[in-house]
Image: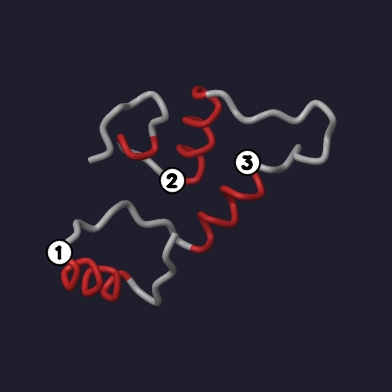
């Protein structure tokens, strides 16, 4: 994971390395993802979310598209 000051800096970095810009996540989305994903981590029954649960978590945070679909085998 790389952190950038702005989307413009992401585009500059990607262009300078000849790589496509991948899906971006804001700090707010990252925080919501972490607190949701690990909300039960200290419970004895904690487990990794299943693919359908992952889709729901990602959608609630606004992360959409094939990249965020754990059932997809393409990451366009």
Q: Residues within 10 Å of mark 3 (few under 14, many from 20)?
A: some
Q: Nearer the viewer, residue 62 or 41?
A: 41
Quadrant assignment for the N terminus: bottom left
Identified at 41% across, 44% down, the residue is 63
Disc 3 secondary structure class: helix
Q: Of all residues shown, which one is farthest toward the right?
A: 44
**Could you say where residue 15 lies in the image, as x and y percent from the top left?**
16, 69
Labelled pair 1, 3 in contact (Cβ < 8 Å)? no
Q: Earlier in the sequence, mark 1 or mark 3?
A: 1
Please name whichever residue, 8 or 61, is drawn nearer the observer in this view of the structure. Answer: 8
Question: How far separated are the C-alphas under marks 2 and 3?
Answer: 15 Å
Measured along the vertical axis of the image, is residue 1 above or below residue 71? Answer: below
Residue farthest toward the front in the current orientation of the protein: 17
Cα–Cα span, label 1 and label 2: 27 Å
- Does label 1 or label 2 sit earlier along the sequence? 1
- Note whether 13 is above or below 29 in the view shown: below
Q: Circle 1 sits on which residue?
A: 18
Residue 21 x, y percent position in the rendering: 24, 58
What residue appears at the point 17 percent right and 73 percent down from the top-left corner? Answer: 16
Q: Residues within 10 Å of mark 1 (few under 14, many from 20)?
A: few
Helix, strand or loop for disc 2: loop
* Label 2 sits on residue: 62
Residue on which disc 3 sits: 37
Give the secondary structure at mark 1: loop
Q: Residue at x 59, y 51 (%)?
A: 32
Identify which residue is drawn at 42% across, 65% down: 2
Structural distance between the alpha carbons of marks 1 and 3 = 32 Å
Residue 13 x %, y %? 25, 72
Left or right of 18, for residue 73: right
């Amino acid at each position: 994971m790389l952190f950038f000051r702005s989307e413009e800096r992401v585009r500059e970095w990607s262009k300078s390395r000849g790589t496509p810009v991948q899906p971006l996540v804001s700090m707010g989305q990252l925080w919501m993802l972490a607190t949701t994903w690990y909300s039960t981590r200290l419970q004895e029954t904690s487990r990794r979310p299943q693919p359908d649960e992952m889709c729901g978590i990602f959608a609630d945070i606004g992360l959409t598209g094939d990249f965020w679909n754990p059932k997809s085998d393409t990451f366009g």
